[in-house]
Image (cartoon, rainbow, N blue to C red):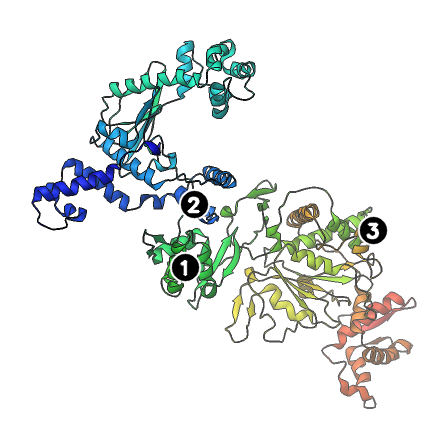
Amino acid sequence: MEKTIKADVMSDWKTEFTKRVQLECKSRKETFTFYDALQKEKYHTQRDKVFLSVVTFLRSEPLRDNDYVKYVSCYIKTGTKLNAKYFRNNLNKLNEYYNKADEKKAKGETFNPFSLRSYQRYVLFMVLKLSGEYTSDLDEPFGVKIDGHREYNPLTNLPSVLRGELPFEVKEYDIKRAFPSFIDIELKKEYRQNVYEILDKKTFAYLLNSNVTNKGADRNKILKELSKVYGDNADKVCTLERFNTKGGAFMDFSKYEKEYIERFVTENNLIDYVRLHDGVFVRAETNVNFFVFDWVVYAVKECIKPKIENEIVNFYDIDESDKVYTSPTMYADFFIQEKFIRISTPDDKIFLLRDTNNVVDFFNHNTDTVSFLKDNINDFANSFDAVADTIARENFSVVKQGFLLIPSIELKYYSDTKNTFGLPFKNGFYYFDLDDTGALKRKEYTDVKGFFAPHEIQSREFKYTDEVGMFEQFLIRACTGRKEPNTQDTKNIFESFKTMFGYLCHNYKDATKNPCIVLTDMDADDETRNGRRGKTLISKAVQEVQESIIKGGKEFDSNYTFVFADLEKKHNVYIIDDVPAGFKYDDLYTNILGDISAQRKGLKAELIKFKDAPKFAITSNWVVPYDERNASTNGRFIEYKFTNYYTSKHTPKDEFKCSFFQDWNADEWNLFYSFVFRCVKLYLQKGIIKTEYNKTGDNYKAYFNNDAVYNEFHRCVNNFVTDITCLSFSVTDFLREYNDSLNPLRFEKMFTIRNVKRYIDAWVGNFNRENKSFMFEYCQRTRKWIKKY
């Protein structure tokens, strides 16, 4: 088509326009230019104004805002694909252009689908036609010609994605299901309504246009496919004459196009229009009242610009001269779109985080903003450099102002409620609500209130299963000493351990029952630290569910000012691992049931309210003392003992042939988290179930784990045991023996009025358990331990 162009209509008009205006205004300038003619508006005709409107429009570079032109041009020139994230139109169509470019390149051919010259000629053609200033003598320079029953013009030669880039709005009226309608006319029967439900458009077009000249074309196969729509009339659609004639079907049906285009134009009194095959283009304000002509129905397209399928904003605009435009509002809108959130802080500093599935990911805005924005520049060559220079200059000015325009919110982490529990997985937030049906459900993160600290769980996809996994099997064996809980006692123990684990995995805190979990070893003797029973795996399991902080027992000192310096609101469980013998459990009273003051070095202390503070868990290889009369302490600590099923010589890794958590695949993680949901539900239904242990021996071992204390205590108390005349003794009697002036250990203050009763109680409990001849019983009235035979 390009070869038929014999003149440039715009250039010819500019030359004629300039000479005419100079002559009419009688200018005596030696050099009278087009620009001079522009100033002489008095001499502009209506036709001149139409041409000038095109000049003004084209100077604005309208294709600069067309994403197809921008993306495909970049790919052709640089071989680089711009960020598809910012492509506003149909990505499938864009990929078709990319594929065509690759095919042309592979053949060594040039691919230029968006010729600027063709587009400019199209704009002038359309404006002249639809403004009533077109004359037939322009047909040749514009390449307008009639071939058969169709008209070919600059509109038919232009890619559809550019047709809407005009200085005014247009409408396109075309025949609905054109060729199927023409077939119905010939058959005098209606099939067109269902044709594309049975055969897709491409297949239908292929069947109609296939002919004897096509390689592999078989009329019988064509008739078989067409019969799905037309039945016995298929041979009247693909007639023998049409099949034996190249383009036969097209020539037959295009005559109907011409006939019904002419009827549409005549009936609607259209004067200024442009034909496009089976349709016409008119200005948007043109009145059209008649749409149905016999079997043919016309439909209207209100906007022929590519449909915006991706409403997305960027932080800049750039004009044809590479001048970059930004503003605080543009930056703010972009940051909000990219899920930036500004956190309100007491010291009024800017704290930003990126919200991805409600996960808190703090953004270092002073150092990372420029590189982040640079990664989102969606231009190339000089335009790219212009934008990069702009953001570097504006980083601490306009960009910061944009940050301040982001609405601030309070950082609140997600919390379960009394009867709900949920976990954030990669494929959604899974939860259950006992106030509802209690069934496990999934919802989008936009429907979840609160944020989540970054955690490995968010990288895992979840699908519930009732199958038993490694961790559940491990817990059965560690707490019961058996592979299966096959007695009522072992079933009860396993159930209690499940509620304990569910309690730690549930991050809601109830002020009336918020105990510290203590994990210890069955039959610990405070002499040999056997350990390796599986307590650490419980701690690690909790860490795989909730954001946790773990401290070694020896490094945790409740009297140290900064002991909670690294505690944050995101932490749901605080684990003190492997505490030593003599650990002061009482020092945790306030922290378990109250607020926690997190004093950080060089900073003001942060008060973490009870509802945001973590639950506590302790592990120890030593025995834990127990005073049955101390209800306050007993309510704050619940002990769970691990059997010796696992030891240093027989570990879970030996039994399951893998390292827990580290070696698990996706299926095993599903089994684990499914078990977590079951444990939490059991805990919410039954509460935390305690396993009752006989603590007499534990108390004795706990109080007398020091050899010096053991020996001195037994020296003193033996006098009351062996003296048959001594029928009872009191605290005073014991201290009199201990504080004897001849006893050198009296200065060590091992036993005092404040602590000796606990020692005596622990000794009496063990003595009564081991001695068969008599026992001691405490009398509250006389405050003495009395011998009972």
The quarter of the image holding the C terminus is: bottom right
Residue at the location (64% across, 73% down)?
558
Asked if disc 2 and disc 3 are in contact, CB closer than 8 Å, the reply is no
Cα–Cα span, label 1 and label 3: 66 Å
Q: Of marks 1 and 3, which one's residue comes earlier in the chain?
A: 1
Q: Nearer the viewer, residue 95 or 603?
A: 95
Residue 522, relative to residue 473: is it above or below? below
Side of 687 where 701 appears, left or right? right
Q: Give x and y (percent) for residue 223.
A: 53, 14
Packing grade of label 2 (10 A; few <14, some 14-19, many >=20) is many
Would you name the residue on which mark 2 appears? 71
Q: Position of residue 80 (x, y in %)?
A: 48, 49
Verify CB contact (< 8 Å) between mark 1 and mark 3.
no
Number of numbered discs visible in the structure rendering = 3
Q: Is 47 or 397 nearer to us in this picture?
A: 47
Residue 482, disc: 3
Q: Is residue 463 visible?
A: yes
One can see residue 782 in this view: no
Closer to the camera, 491 or 290? 290
Q: Amino acid at mark 3?
A: Arg
Is label 2 or label 3 in front?
2
Nearer to the camera, 58 or 464:
58
The N terminus sits in image quarter: top left
In 3D space, how far apart are the residues under numbered discs 2 and 3 (Cα atoms)? 66 Å
State the SS at label 2.
Answer: helix
Q: Quadrant of residue 347?
A: bottom left
Q: Which mark is residue 388?
A: 1
